[in-house]
Amino acid sequence: MPPVTSQPLSDSGLNLGLFTIPTSFLLQAGTASILLLLMAEKATLDTLQNFGEASEELLRGERLPILNFPDQNELNRS
Protein backbone atom coordinates (compact mmCIF):
# COMPACT_ATOMS: atom_id res chain seq x y z
CA MET A 1 0.00 0.00 0.00
CA PRO A 2 1.56 3.34 -1.03
CA PRO A 3 2.04 5.97 1.68
CA VAL A 4 -0.46 8.78 1.78
CA THR A 5 1.12 12.21 1.74
CA SER A 6 -0.83 15.36 2.31
CA GLN A 7 0.16 17.69 -0.49
CA PRO A 8 -1.77 20.84 -1.28
CA LEU A 9 -3.66 20.65 -4.50
CA SER A 10 -1.81 22.78 -6.98
CA ASP A 11 -4.45 22.39 -9.67
CA SER A 12 -7.45 23.68 -7.70
CA GLY A 13 -9.28 25.75 -10.26
CA LEU A 14 -9.73 25.91 -13.99
CA ASN A 15 -6.45 25.17 -15.74
CA LEU A 16 -6.32 26.85 -19.14
CA GLY A 17 -2.73 25.99 -19.97
CA LEU A 18 -1.04 29.38 -19.63
CA PHE A 19 -2.85 30.35 -16.44
CA THR A 20 -5.22 28.93 -13.85
CA ILE A 21 -8.45 30.54 -12.69
CA PRO A 22 -9.04 29.88 -8.97
CA THR A 23 -12.28 28.19 -7.97
CA SER A 24 -13.11 31.01 -5.54
CA PHE A 25 -13.12 33.47 -8.45
CA LEU A 26 -15.35 31.16 -10.49
CA LEU A 27 -17.75 30.87 -7.55
CA GLN A 28 -17.87 34.65 -7.08
CA ALA A 29 -18.49 35.25 -10.79
CA GLY A 30 -21.24 32.62 -10.85
CA THR A 31 -22.93 34.03 -7.75
CA ALA A 32 -22.83 37.59 -9.08
CA SER A 33 -24.30 36.54 -12.42
CA ILE A 34 -27.15 34.64 -10.75
CA LEU A 35 -27.97 37.61 -8.50
CA LEU A 36 -27.98 39.98 -11.49
CA LEU A 37 -30.22 37.57 -13.37
CA LEU A 38 -32.72 37.49 -10.48
CA MET A 39 -32.76 41.29 -10.25
CA ALA A 40 -33.29 41.59 -14.01
CA GLU A 41 -36.13 39.06 -13.81
CA LYS A 42 -37.89 41.08 -11.11
CA ALA A 43 -37.46 44.34 -13.03
CA THR A 44 -38.78 42.73 -16.22
CA LEU A 45 -41.77 41.28 -14.39
CA ASP A 46 -42.63 44.65 -12.83
CA THR A 47 -42.26 46.42 -16.19
CA LEU A 48 -44.48 43.94 -18.01
CA GLN A 49 -47.11 44.16 -15.27
CA ASN A 50 -47.09 47.97 -15.49
CA PHE A 51 -47.44 47.78 -19.29
CA GLY A 52 -50.40 45.44 -18.88
CA GLU A 53 -52.12 47.76 -16.43
CA ALA A 54 -51.48 50.79 -18.65
CA SER A 55 -52.88 49.06 -21.73
CA GLU A 56 -55.92 47.97 -19.73
CA GLU A 57 -56.56 51.58 -18.73
CA LEU A 58 -56.01 52.77 -22.28
CA LEU A 59 -58.42 50.29 -23.85
CA ARG A 60 -60.97 50.25 -21.03
CA GLY A 61 -63.90 51.91 -22.82
CA GLU A 62 -62.80 51.70 -26.42
CA ARG A 63 -64.68 48.55 -27.38
CA LEU A 64 -67.93 49.26 -25.54
CA PRO A 65 -70.94 50.28 -27.62
CA ILE A 66 -72.48 53.71 -27.16
CA LEU A 67 -75.95 53.32 -25.66
CA ASN A 68 -78.55 55.97 -26.37
CA PHE A 69 -80.73 56.21 -23.29
CA PRO A 70 -83.98 58.12 -23.68
CA ASP A 71 -84.40 61.26 -21.61
CA GLN A 72 -86.99 61.42 -18.84
CA ASN A 73 -89.03 63.94 -20.88
CA GLU A 74 -89.32 61.52 -23.78
CA LEU A 75 -90.49 58.75 -21.45
CA ASN A 76 -93.19 60.96 -19.88
CA ARG A 77 -94.59 61.99 -23.31
CA SER A 78 -95.24 58.49 -24.49
Image (cartoon, rainbow, N blue to C red):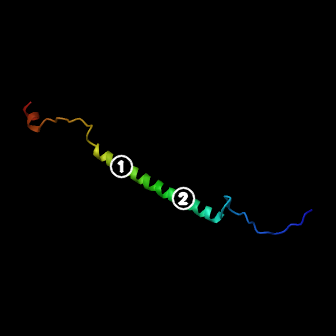
Q: Secondary structure at mark 2?
A: helix
As shown in the figure, which amino acid type bears the numbered disc 1? Phe
Residue behind mark 1: 51
Vertical position of residue 42 compared to residue 64: above or below: below
- 11 left or right of 36 in image: right
Q: Position of residue 3 (x, y in %)?
A: 89, 66
Q: Residue at x 47, y 54 (%)?
A: 41
Within 10 Å of disc 2 (Cα), the crowding (few <14, some 14-19, many 20+) is few
Seen in the image, is 63 located left or right of residue 72?
Answer: right
Q: Residue at x 36, y 51 (%)?
A: 50
| Nearer to us in this view, 25 or 70 | 25
Which structural element holds mark 1? helix
Q: Which residue is pictured at 92% across the width and 62% down the height? A: 1
Residue 26 horizontal/vertical position (percent)? 62, 61
Q: How many circles with numbers are drawn on the protein?
A: 2
Q: Nearer the viewer, residue 29 or 19?
A: 19
Compared to 51, does 63 lie above or below?
above
Q: Residue 40: x and y, percent?
A: 47, 56
Mark nearer the viewer, 1 or 2: 2
Marks 1 and 2, Cα distance to the nearest angstrom? 27 Å
Residue under label 2, please give it.
33
Q: Cβ–Cβ below 8 Å for labels 1 and 2? A: no
